[in-house]
C-alpha cells in the first residue's frame, strides 16, 4: 500500500490452522482437487491474504487519525483520490475505488497521511460502501470536531460486475455530509468541483 502502515488481523494469525483447513474444505466442496500442484499452497496463501485484507479489525479507526494538532486554519482542507480496497459483506467479493475527504477545521487538524490511514482502518474489513462513507465522516467529526465534513466514495463492486446482473464498469457513488456541508449547498458544490479537477 505504498507508505501506508499495514494493519494485520491478529485473529487470523491466531487461527491460521483452522482457516487453512476450512479453505481446503471449501475448495473440495466446489469440486477442486486440493492435492494438485496449483492448489497445494492455496489455503496458506488465502489465510495470509485474510490477515491483510481484514486488517482493519485490528485497530479502532479513531486511533488511525493519531495525534491531532492545534491549528487556527479554518478553511477547506481536501484529500482526494485515496485508493481503497474492501470486501462486500454480502458476498465476500472485493470492491474498490477512491475516497475524497473534505473538512473545515475548527482548531484541530490531522496529519494528511492520517486520513489515508483512517480509510484503510475502515475499509479493511467486511463492509458496505454506504457504511464506509458514513463511518469516515462520523469519525472525523468525533475526533477533530470540525465545522463540517464531506466524504465522497466511488466504488466498483465485483459482486455486481462479475456475478448477478454482470454490469462491469458500473460505479457506485456515496456521500456523507456533516455540519456546515449539510447546511450549505454552496460548500457542497465547491467540494464537488474541487474533487473533479
Image (cartoon, grey):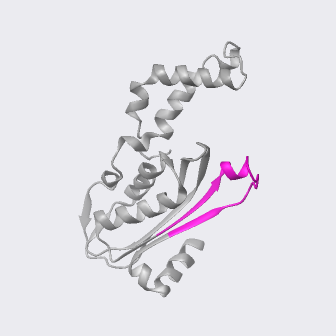
Q: Quadrant of residue 150?
A: bottom left
* Residue drawn 71% across the image and 21% down it: 32
- 105, above or below 19, in the image: below
Is residue 160 a member of the stretch shown in magenta? yes
Residue 108: x, y in percent?
Answer: 27, 69
Indicate left or right for 61 with 163 as reference: left
Q: Nearer the viewer, residue 120 or 3?
A: 120
Is residue 76 a member of the stretch shown in magenta? no
Query: Farthest residue in the front direction?
Result: 29
Badge count: 0
Q: Nearer the viewer, residue 79 or 33?
A: 33
Residue 107: x, y in percent?
Answer: 25, 73
Indicate left or right for 83 with 75 as reference: right
Query: Farthest residue in the top direction?
Result: 35
Q: Quadrant of residue 181?
A: bottom left
Q: Which residues are magenta?
A: 151-175
Q: Quadrant of residue 195?
A: bottom right
Residue 18: x, y in percent?
Answer: 47, 21
* Residue drawn 29% across the image and 63% down it: 143
- 50, above or below 108, in the image: above
* Residue drawn 25% across the image and 71% down it: 71
Which quadrant: the C terminus? bottom right
* Residue drawn 42% across the image and 24% down it: 15
Q: Is residue 40 visible?
A: yes
Residue 45: x, y in percent?
Answer: 56, 26
- 86, above or below 72, in the image: above
Q: Is residue 81 visible?
A: no
Amino acid at each position: 500500500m505504498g507508505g501506508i502502515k499495514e494493519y494485520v488481523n491478529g485473529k487470523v494469525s491466531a487461527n491460521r490452522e483452522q482457516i487453512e483447513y476450512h479453505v481446503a474444505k471449501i475448495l473440495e466442496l466446489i469440486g477442486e482437487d486440493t492435492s494438485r500442484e496449483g492448489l497445494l499452497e492455496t489455503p496458506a496463501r488465502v489465510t495470509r491474504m485474510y490477515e491483510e485484507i481484514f486488517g482493519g479489525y485490528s485497530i479502532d479507526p479513531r486511533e488511525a487519525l493519531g495525534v491531532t494538532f492545534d491549528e487556527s486554519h479554518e478553511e477547506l482542507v481536501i484529500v482526494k483520490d485515496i485508493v481503497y480496497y474492501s470486501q462486500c459483506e454480502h458476498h465476500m467479493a472485493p470492491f474498490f475505488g477512491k475516497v475524497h475527504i473534505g473538512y473545515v477545521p475548527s482548531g484541530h487538524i490531522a496529519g494528511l497521511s492520517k486520513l489515508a490511514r483512517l480509510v484503510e482502518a475502515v475499509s479493511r474489513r467486511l463492509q458496505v460502501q454506504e457504511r464506509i462513507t458514513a463511518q469516515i465522516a462520523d469519525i472525523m467529526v468525533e475526533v477533530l470536531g470540525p465545522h463540517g465534513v464531506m466524504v465522497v466514495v466511488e466504488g466498483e463492486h465485483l459482486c455486481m460486475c462479475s456475478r448477478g446482473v454482470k454490469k462491469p464498469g458500473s460505479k457506485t457513488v456515496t456521500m456523507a455530509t456533516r455540519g456546515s456541508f449539510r447546511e450549505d449547498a454552496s460548500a457542497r458544490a465547491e467540494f464537488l468541483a474541487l474533487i473533479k479537477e
